[in-house]
Amino acid sequence: MVFESKLLCKIIGFINLINNQLYKSKYLTIFKRLGSHSVLALIALIVIGGATRVMEAGLACPDWPLCYGSFLPFNHMNLRVFLEWFHRLDAFLVGMLILFKFTLSIIWKNEIPNWLPKTYSLLLFLVIVQGSFGALTVINLLDSYTVTGHLLMAFLLLITTIAINQNLEKDDMEKPLIWWRLLLIVPLLLTLIQSFIGVRLSSTWSAHICLSFNKQCLILNTHKLFAFPIAFAILLIIATAIYKRSLLNENWKYLSALIFLLFSQIALGVLSLKTNLNEPIFIIGHQLNSSLFIAILTTLIFRNPFIKKRLNHSLNSEMVGINL
């Protein structure tokens, strides 16, 4: 009789576990999908911002947050105005999406991990800071440091969003490899520094001055030299993954993308200089590559390479308990 009671309790617990896992996975799936949309929207926002800067459209709308005093300035619309207006619209939509996720995390706080609402509140704070930088770029007439801070804050938003997305999968994973993460952090930090130098290069017109008059070339030369440690760090990661065959097997898609982006980024940089920065497509492509590069490195940092199926793993543990 005692055995039957214990068995019945285990079966009830087993059924409740299944229902609980399926119930919670519904909410987490929604956040994962919204997170994926956020990543794409942020990358698009960074690229549109780069296009706005390249096309010298940063002050095409002289006021903020409206453009010529209206939400849609038909009477002043041209390519530059459209780029600046669309950049602001995209930023607004990204902010609303993050606010929506934060609101859902408060409403469903009892059904999701405790860290999620807190992290979304941080993300919402970063959006507010980013919006402030956007306003300052207009108020300060495209001050170089303000423009640089605006881009780096966008990258921080991208990194935070990807980190949240990957941590939503945390229960599906084994213990992460700390040394692997540290190895990946190096090129990520170097790429952020490289991006900082790149924005300073374009926002101070140092590249044009260097190429035209052979003056103020320090920033341009530093930007070019930084490609070497980044390339070395990426090649070291690839070599390590090849040596640790399991890392290569589980992450080959991401690693292949890194190699492709590395060489295409170098090619786009060379083409930009060869054309004296007169071809916007190369510069915008350079910005897009940087965004994708940072996105993939961040994914690899927060993504454990050895994945398990959470539900199957949990159910197997319960089945062991039932097997008295």
Image (cartoon, rainbow, N blue to C red):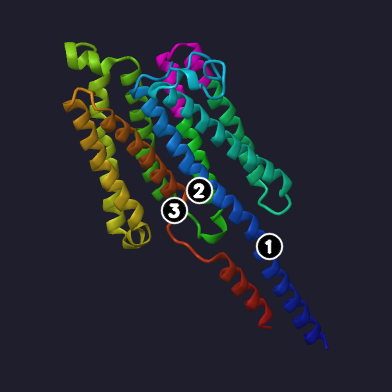
Count of all numbered marks drawn on residues in the image: 3
Foreground residue among 243 and 125: 125
Indicate the position of residue 128 as horizontal and vertical percent values. 59, 27
Indicate the position of residue 218 as horizontal and vertical percent values. 24, 17
- Mark closest to the chain's N terminus, 1 or 3: 1
Indicate the position of residue 85 as horizontal and vertical percent values. 48, 25
Q: Residue at x 66, y 82 (%)?
A: 323
Of the residues shown, which amino acid type is indicated by label 3?
A: Leu
Number of the label disc, if any, that sits on residue 70: none
Of the residues shown, which amino acid type is indicated by label 2?
A: Ser
Q: Is residue 65 left or right of residue 61?
A: right
Of the residues shown, which amino acid type is indicated by label 1?
A: Tyr
Inter-mark Cα distance, 2 to 3:
24 Å
Residues drawn in magenta: 134-152
Residue to which mark 1 is pinned: 23
Q: Is residue 195 left or right of residue 25?
A: left
